Amino acid sequence: MELKQIESFVRVAELGSFTKASIAMGLAQPLLSRHVRHLEVELHQNLLIRNGRGVSPTAAGLLMLEHARGILHQVALAKEELSGTKGTLSGPISIGLPPSLSKLITVPLTLAFQKALPQAKLTLTEGFSAPMYESLRSGRIDIALLYNPAPTPELEQTLLHEDALILIASKQPLKHFHHLKPIKAALTLKELCELPLIVPSRPNAFRLLIETEMHRIGKKPHIILEIDGINAILELVKEGLGFAVLPTYTLNQFPDTTPFTTHAIKSPQLRSQLMLVWSSKRPSTKTQKISLNLTQKIILSALKM
């Protein structure tokens, strides 16, 4: 049993495709297939089920996947600790960022990592909470910033920031909704249901929170546009094409906030929790522990702007 065989199996199982794993590892697909097949022969088990959509682990494959991740992690840990004897900390660190924070913290986070961990290989991935949650569980990323994640024994999480979503409007009149009355400083969730909203598409955490809370009072949001991009949403709001419902700090990344007005939402509030999340099944290396502390520090600093 060779490490390359184990690594090949893990990447194929996680990505669900020999083609994707081949590209990710920079290996020819026939060689990758041989690695996995030799592992199956040695273990006398079929580890993967081949189907028209790709591959998926068998029951034996799922068990092997857990052991294989542990083996690869221990190898990475050994390499890191050995490099630590030379006074350096290295190793790959993959962090998942939500779109609402990506522009705000990518540069300060990268600069902080380059200063604190110059030998580490940092990868930043932008994505919605739901797919990043699965990437954490599968080991494709090490750390993620998630909104409102469900508690699970597989993941450790710590609360970084809790914020109430607000209504963001333009100071200029709405172009196509002249019948609407002026927006009050604070409005109820029921009143919010009547306003034309520009929101991200599912499975964006803010979109799901809005829909879930409105469903509790027997209402639905009046969605007129779905836009995946906070700056794009705010640009459309600025032009008077609708309203946005977002955390207050999303305005921090907009160069000029003077065209906007903000309005509290009450009865009930739409409260969103930003959590720092990592796997509970894989022991953290020194590099990962420093990365967790560094990420937490940068996020808290950015949200105070």
Image (tube, helix red, strand yellow):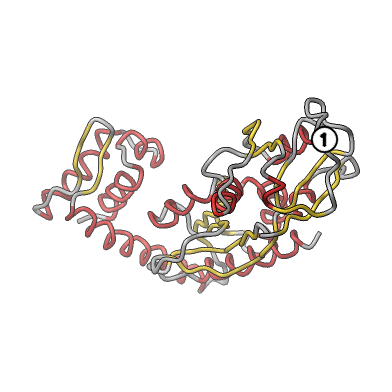
Viewer-nearest residue: 221 or 68 = 221
Residue 264, relative to residue 242: is it above or below?
Answer: below
Instruction: Tell me how many marks there are.
Output: 1
Residue sticking out furthest to the top: 176
Residue 6, relative to residue 255: is it above or below?
Answer: below
**Left-right relation of 299 to 73:** right
Dot 1 crowding, Cα within 10 Å, few <14, some 14–19, many 20+: many
**Left-right relation of 28 to 216:** left
| Amino acid type, residue under disc 1 in the picture | Lys
The percent position of residue 55, horizontal first and vertical second, equals 25, 39
**Left-right relation of 56 to 24:** left
What's the residue at 78%, 34% (across, down)?
A: 235
What's the residue at 63%, 45% (across, down)?
A: 99
What's the residue at 11%, 52% (across, down)?
A: 45
Viewer-nearest residue: 44 or 299 = 299
What's the residue at 74%, 60% (across, down)?
A: 303
Q: Which residue is mark 1?
A: 238
The percent position of residue 122, horizontal first and vertical second, equals 57, 53
Residue sticking out furthest to the bottom: 85
Q: Quadrant of the C terminus?
A: bottom right
The percent position of residue 129, horizontal first and vertical second, equals 53, 51
> Where is residue 1, by image quadrant?
bottom left
Could you say whether the residue bearing mark 1 is in a helix, strand or loop? helix
The percent position of residue 4, horizontal first and vertical second, equals 29, 50
> Where is residue 234, by image quadrant?
top right
**Left-right relation of 160 to 301:** left
